[in-house]
Amino acid sequence: MLLESLTPDGTYQERYPRYTREVGDHLVQVIAPPTGVEAAAGVPWIWRAEFLGAFDDADRAMLDAGWHLVYVGVPDRFGDPVAMAAWWAAYRLVIDELGFDPRPGVIALSRGGLYAVSWAAQHPECVSGIYLDNAVCDLRSWPGGLGDAPGAPAEWQRLLSVYGFAPDDLDAVVAASPISKLAPLATAGIPLLVGYGDADRSVPAHENSEVLLTRYAELGGPARAVVRPGGDHHPHGIDDPAVVREFFETVR
């Protein structure tokens, strides 16, 4: 493992050494286990899909268990082809140069689900498991606001622009949504851990997580749901981050 080939860049959350590398137009951040914690055998890692540092109890639990954490910032791309090209370049860096395990676990909160599922659908062999938390699963719900969710008008316009969709082309919007990209994941048997609040007003579960769980089960994909009764969109996270750690350690 050659983290020395990257640039030391201070620490993450005060405890974890951070290294960076510009890859194309994007900054790749690689965060190591804390000093005194040996890297787990085989160099397993977690790919954080958006919002690095937010609601990160599970990320830190994995770092404390000897895993690495990787993030490449491609904000406001909603998991589109440009974002996936950046993810591929970052993936090649950590696999080819750093010698990490070729099948990372993925943590995806909110719109991070768009990136995580798009990646897994294109590269199912490059994922060991995905933890989705209050994830956006149907773009009509968020940012579209075409159901019970209030939506996000500015983000909706940005989404249409990024993908080049006409405002009335809802078939294309559905096709770009995680709920329509599950077949490759199910075929590969990628396990999902799906946490959500059943009172989420921004990304309602009945339009997102529960639809995804139902469709994944119909496709024969393995999934576990962890429901937070009365939970809204924030705060994210399963109460006991050990649940997430055990999930990734088991599916690895």
Image (cartoon, rainbow, N blue to C red):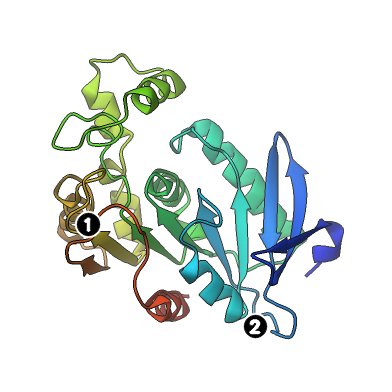
**Which residue does the image show at 23% across and 32% down from the upper left?**
140
Q: Earlier in the sequence, mark 1 or mark 2?
A: 2
From the image, tell me which residue sits under label 2. 41
| Quarter of the view holding residue 124 | bottom left
Q: Mark 1 and mark 2: span between their CA atoms?
A: 31 Å
Q: Residue 53: give x, y in percent of width and height.
A: 55, 57
| Quarter of the view holding residue 203 | top left
Q: Residue 226: give x, y in percent of width and height.
A: 25, 69
Q: Which mark is residue 216?
A: 1
**Which residue does the image show at 62% across and 58% down from the upper left?**
70
**Of the residues shown, which amino acid type is indicated by label 1?**
Tyr
Q: Tell me: residue 167, above or below residue 183.
A: above
Look at the numbered disc 2 and give the secondary structure of its residue: loop
**Of the residues shown, which amino acid type is indicated by label 2?**
Ala
Look at the numbered disc 1 and give the secondary structure of its residue: helix
Q: Residue 43: give x, y in percent of width and height.
A: 65, 74
> In the visual, does 66 lie left or right of 141?
right
| Quarter of the view holding residue 177 | top left
